[in-house]
Each structure stands twice: as structure tokens, then as C-alpha cells.
Image (spheres, coloured by chain):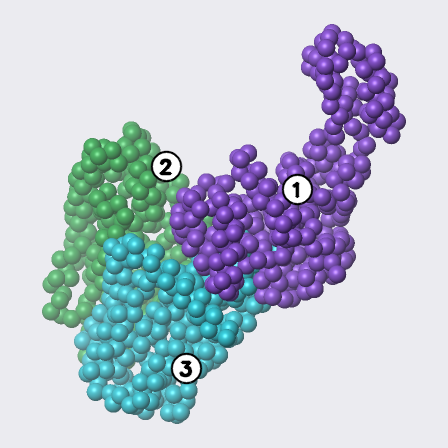
Amino acid sequence: MKRFLPYMAVVSARYRMLLQYRAAAFAGLVTQCFWGAIRLMIVAAFYAASAPAQPMSLLEVVAYIWLGQAFFGMLPWNIDEEFAQKVRDGSVAYDLLRPVDLYAFWYSHTLAYRTAPTTLRAIPLGCLAMLVLPRLGLAEWALGAPPSWVSGVLFSVSLIGAAALSTAITMLTNISLLWTISAAGMDRIMPAVVTVFAGMVIPLPLFPDWVQPFLRLQPFRGLVDVPFRIYSGNIPPTVALLEIVSQGVWVGCLVWLGRVLLARGTRKLVVQGG
Amino acid sequence: MAIGEDLKLYWLYVKLSVRAQLQYRAAFLLAALGQFLITGVEFLGVWALFERFGRLHSWSLPEVAVFYGLVNCTFACADALSRGFDQFGVLYIKTGHFDRLLLRPRSTILQLAGHELALRRIGRFVQGLIVLVWAASVLNVEWSFARVSLVLFTILGGACLFFGLIIVQATLAFWTTETLEIMNTLTYGGVEAAQYPMAIYHIAFRRFFTFVVPLACVSYFPVVGVLGIADPLGSPRWFQYLAPASGILFLSACLVLWQWGIKHYTSTGS
Amino acid sequence: MAQILVENLTKTFRVAKRQAGLWGAVTGLVHRTYHDIPALAGIDFTIEESELVGYIGPNGAGKSTTVKILSGILVPTAGRCEVNGVTPWTNRLQHVQSIGVVFGQRTQLWWDLPVIESFEVLRAIYRIPAAVFRKNSARLIERLQLQDFLDIPVRQLSLGQRMRSDLAAALLHGPRLLFLDEPTIGLDAVSKLAVRDFIKMLNRDDGVTVILTTHDMDDIEALCQRVMVIGGGKIVSDGSLAALRATVSHERRLIVDLVNAQEVIEEPAARMVERHGRRVELAFDPREVSPAQLISRIAAKHAIQDLFVEHPPIERIIADLYAKHGELEA
């Protein structure tokens, strides 16, 4: 347990820092409610206009949209600016001097970076979507509860998996900086790729049927699509277990890949002198 | 003439800004590509939903694509001018550099618009244009002089509207030094909303975006006019043709607010 | 008519009281209490064309408030102010066309542009006709010795080079009135002299009115025929440097280098300030004993190698004056 102390310290410090930005968080809350409302209306209009059965019911999509707004911050949108700055001015070399595993250290840091802002947004937004809306007579727009406590529990587990996955992906983007110092390539393309394949544009099942096999094979679905559909029961508990396992497998692969690349990248740094 | 001189000065700002950005050509191209992709994936969603559902009430995919393409082109134009404004609090108020703008015998709006012409916004513009051109070709729109003018007028009115919102966001910085993300709700949120015909939204929403922030007047109504169809919301054709003017009026109102902000700034000091 | 006319200029800042703690922040959202900070308590002065005026005072005394009002970027609470016949804050565009302002700590030049290109942008901003611009810029470049770094981006310039460039930039449009705020701060000795010489020449040869705000008393001594001291929102002294000295004390200094380092000077009309071996510094009041009398008295009793008669250091004068009016400089 003691071995984890430095990493826990990093996570806690990061949380405390990010929690200071309360006003920004409130503004973000309003923005996200607004975006959620727009998407709900669009999707509802489509559902209302046509009859055939769809892979997801409207209620499931409503839940999906609200959860998407709540956990928006957890997507591996962008690189860690702090890390980018360290690479730019070469001080990342100092981190090599610390008696901690470099990957684990930065993983903890990034994990906090990915999850702390979400904590501030998810809870108020969730309360609003779940509890306030029905009271305002907008029950059909509200975020419904999971169909069973099993789904709820599995959702929580898959959420942790999503956080781990998101961090692992962010780490890869960060590590790519060691090769392309100006952070050009990856972080420009990443946001678009993630948005589509995670299911943030529309839930993955709503994409055409012929593309579904491909969508099932990529890691990003574990970020948004899988956890939110577990929540609403669109992915039933039995399948959910499998999905969570596949999340874990992806996390494992990406962490392993990240460690390998980080070792190569830092060796390059040391050899070249930064 | 005053406007002529202002345009000359603005042109100089543009030349300097463009030159500075093109110096880092690779970075610019990547940034533009990134913008193109992140804004373009939105249309992927529109397309996929139409693939699955076939129709959206009375609207077909190409028709919705016109709404989509036009608002993206419009916003890209305004967004290109926005850098000086959305960083206004940090770059000008906190540093006190705004004083220097006041010490120059030119409009502060002009100087701030000249801060940077963000070329990377072309990514959003190109994506919108592609969608718009595709839609126009599929729909077989009869491109009369009136319709073309309406498109251009819509882009102008819309860019004025978004520019006005951007100015309001900066004006807030006179009172609070925190960047108020809340305005993003209206700019980026507005673009999201206007990508689809406003008729599908809740009436309260539509009313807000017609009478308070006239977004519908620079996207929904004129596009209905361009498409030449009957408006499900029942607006007359002449209104559809004149609606973009509200964007210009909105901008004027925002400029008044800005002057008020300056008055506050000069009487409280920094 | 005076170029600058200031009458009963008053400025009170209304600042919201910051409540401590979380509860305070919440109540602060609903109910704000304010307190008034009087920055200027009704000041009066006139400045004629081609004067070179030093405007000094402790921090917080109202210097920058005055300069901001005169330059048109701050509106006073009460009082009258006219610069070149125009009220600065109501005719901003017209007013700023006729003034130049240099802030010692902040450049107005574009960070990434070569100096000469910054000048070109300013030419467009101030609508300077081509011929006038050519003449003005050539003259300023030559006088301030900017030729060697005109093509270098401002961010790469040394502080001295940047300050000289800023001076030129402020004068390209040929203003008749120049505000200088701490122009020599942080500069090396050579640059300081260059800047001072330029200001003196600008004022003497071109007749540009200069208002100089500074904490550097050497600037004041070197340049200013007239010094205004502001303290606690009021003008406490306005006149020549000599008059300023007299406000605080009439004391003068006599420095004597004795031949014999062991000798002690005993003189009832003078008090010893300092002694280093041969050098004795005495303070005396010229109203009680004239310098000539004092010198002859001392010379009669001691063998003198050298002597000087001086004013006390200007810093001492100012510090005493500031101390009288509340805040001391940090």
C-alpha cells in the first residue's frame, strides 16, 4: 500500500487544484444542460417522425445523452498541457530522476486530470437530469434510473473502466509528444476520432448496420458507448460483464503499449539530450 | 472617408496576422485539418441518423444539410475574428493593455478584431461549404439572383449575430475577470442548434432564438426561403428574405453594450 | 491659454468590500457593501506649452490617476480638465491624436514584429501622411540611434533599445504633449543618459510639453525646471526644484577635505553629518550663516585641501516631504 502513496498524493493534489475552478464549473453546467437539451430535441424529433424499431429506445437514448453530458470531461480530448510544457522546455528529464515509475506517475496525474472536473459537473448535472426535470413536468426528458441494481453496479464498474481507458489513451497522446515536440499530429486528429468512435456524436448502435462490426472492434467504445448502454440496460447485465472484461483488455494493451513507447521515448531524450 | 480608413487598417492587421501564421505552415495546416475533422464529424451524425430514420418530419437529408452547411460557414467567418475578444479578459484587461487601445485614435472593436485572423477556422468553413455544395447539387435548387443574394445576406447577417455574441462575451470581462464559458452556450450551442431546422425544437426554445438572440432569423427562416418551400412555422416569404437583417441589428445592440462596458471601465479604472 | 488646465479635479474610487470566507462570498453575491477610496481630493494646476514638468509622489498618492485622467482613459468624479482646449475623456479620439504616452514597464510595440514594422502599423493607426511619417521617423531614428536594430523583433531587444523604440513610437504622429511614466526604470546608466538627453532635446528644440512621472530623482534633477509633488490626493508642492527644496528645509551641505585628518571642526553654526578620515560633511542653514562666511570661518582655523557646497540629496528632500504626507515609499 505504501508503494502507492506517491501516486495517491499526485491524484489528490490535482483534484484539489482543479476543484478551485468553481465558477467555470457552474458555467460549464449551464452549457451542458443546454447542449443536452438540443440533442434531446433532435433525437426525439427523429424518433417521433418514424415508426420502425430501433436498436435503442428513445428513453435509452435520452439516458445516453444526459450521461454523455455529465461525463463529457472524461473523454481523452486533449493532451495534458502541463506535460506538453514539460516536454517543450525539456524539464521532463527531471521526472526521470525521481524514484518513481515514470508511467505510473504520469498515469496517476492524468487520471486525476481526467476525472476531477467531471466530479464537479457530473453530480449536479445528474441530479438535475434525474430529479429536477420530472418535478418540472418534463419526465420524458429526464434521466431515468437503471432498470436494476445490477445494471447500476455494472455501470459503476464500467465507468471506472472508462476512466482507466481514457487515461491510457491520453497517455499515448501525451507520449507521442516525445516524438513530435510541437504536439502537432496526434492531438489535432484525436478529438475527432474519439468523438466519433466513442459514441459522442450519436450512440454507436444508431450508426448504420453495415458499420457495426467495425465499431465493435475499436477501443474507444469503452469510453462512452459501453458504460452508458450498460446503465440503461440496452446492454443487458450478462453481456455487460463481457464488455467490462473487454474494457479491461483494452486498458491492459494500451497501458503496455504506453509503457513501451514511454521507455523508448525517454531513452531517446536521454540520448539526444532533450 | 472613415470606413475606408478603417478597412485599410484592418487589412494591414490581416496581412500581418496571416503572415505570422503561415510562417508555421505545418502547424497551421494541421490545425485547420483538426478543425475540419472535429466540425465535420457532426455531419456524420446527421447522415447516420437519416440513414436509420429516413426522414425528420417533413425534412430530407439534403434539406437539413443546407441548414447545416450554411450555419457552419457563417460561424466560421465570425469565429475567425474572435480571438481578440474571447481572450479579452486575459490578454487585455488583466494586463492593463486595454489602456493602450484607448490611447489610440481608433475604434477599440477594430483594434480587437485586428488582434488575429484565425486562419485555422477555415477548417470549419470548408467542411460547411462542402456539405452546402453537395446539398445544393442534390436538391436542384434554382439559383436565381434573389436566392444567391439571400445566401450571401444570410452569411452576413449570421456572421454579425455571432460576432455580436462574441463581443458580449468580451464585454462581460469589464465586470468580471473570469472567462465566462456561459457565452459558449449561445455561440457553439447556437451552431449546434441551427444545424437542424429550428422547427423541430420546443416552442420556448424557438421563441428565444427568434426574439432574444435572433439565431432563427439568420439560419432557419432564410434557408426556408432559399429552399423555396412552405414554412411549417408559417412565415411569409418576404420575412424570410429580410430576416438576416436582424443579425445586423443585434450586432448594433451588442456594440452599444460594449460602449457601456467601456464607460464602466473608464470610470472605475483598472 | 494654458495647454493643460486642471481645476478641482476629484476622483473617488468605489470598491466593493471583499467578504472573507465562503459565507461572505455567498452573502456578497446578494448584498454588496462598498467603501470609497479618495484618490484625488481636488487638485488644481496649469501647464503651459513647452514646459518640462516632473510629477512625483509616493505610491498611491494619485500620480497615475492624474495621468490617466489627463490622457482620457479615466473619468473623474468631479472637476474640470482641459488639454489643448478639449476635455480628454469626452473627446477621446480627438484627444489621443494629439498626445503621446510612454509606459516604462509596458511596451506598446508588437512583440513579434520588427521595430520598423511596428512603426508602420502605428502610421496606419494614427493616419500619419506618408511624407510626415518619413520625416518624423527618420528624425526619431537618428536622434535615438535606432538604426542598428530596426529589423529586430521587439521581443529580442534589450530594455534600453526597447525604451528608445517606445519613445520614438510615441512621437511618430507628432504630438505636442508627451506623458512619460517611469521612462528610465531598469535602464543601464548609458541608456538612462541617452533617454534623458533625448527628452531634454525634445523639449528644448521641438517645444514638446513633457510630463514626467518617476521615482528616479536623478531624472528630476537632470530634466525638470518645475516639479509638482502630489501626496494623499493633493498637490503639496508646485514650483521650481529650488522652491521644493526650500519647502522642506533650507539646509545646505558643506563638504570639507582637511589636510590634517586628525583635526576636529568645531563650528556652532554647522552640525556634522558625516566624517570619513579627511572628509567632513557639515550641514548648515544659509539663512543663519552664509556659505561664504562659514567657509572663511573654517578656513581661518583649519588647513583645507578642498571644499564643496551642495544641496542635500534630493532623495532626502523627497523622503521628508513624503513622510510629512503620510505614506513612505516602500
Which numbered disc, 3 or 2, marks the residue closer to the eye?
3
Q: Which mark is residue B244?
A: 3
Chain C: give its colour. Answer: purple
Q: Is residue A256 left or right of residue B224?
A: left
The nearer-to-camera label among 3 and 1 is 1
Which element is circle 1 on? Answer: helix
The amino acid on which the numbered mark 1 sits, given as a three-letter code, is: Leu
Mark 1 nearby-residue class (10 Å; few <14, some 14–19, many ≥20) = many
> Crowdedness of circle 3 by 10 Å Cα count: few (<14), some, many (20+)?
many
**Chain B in the picture: what colour?**
cyan
Q: Amino acid at mark 3?
A: Pro
For the C terminus of chain A, the quadrant is top left
| Residue in view at x 39 percent, y 49 percent | C151
Q: CA distance from mark 2 to mark 1?
A: 59 Å
Q: Residue at x 27, y 32 (%)?
A: A96
Disc 3 and disc 1: Cα gap in Å? 60 Å
Give the camera-side residue of B213 and A45: B213
Measured from the top left, where is residue C221 in percent x and y? 68, 38
Question: Is residue B99 visible from the viewing direction of this image?
Answer: no
| Residue lying at 38% horizontally and 71% vertically, measured from the top left | B190
Asked if disc 3 and disc 1 are in contact, CB closer than 8 Å, the reply is no
Q: Which mark is residue A9?
A: 2
Question: Is label 2 in a helix, a strand or a loop?
Answer: helix
Residue B22 can be seen, yes or no: yes
- The crowd level at tag 2 (other Cα within 10 Å; few <14, some 14-19, many 20+) is few
Residue C241 image-quadrant placement = top right
The residue to which callout 1 is attached is C223
Question: Is residue C262 depicted above or below A196 in this figure?
Answer: above
The color chain A is rendered in: green
Q: Residue C216: x and y, percent?
A: 63, 38
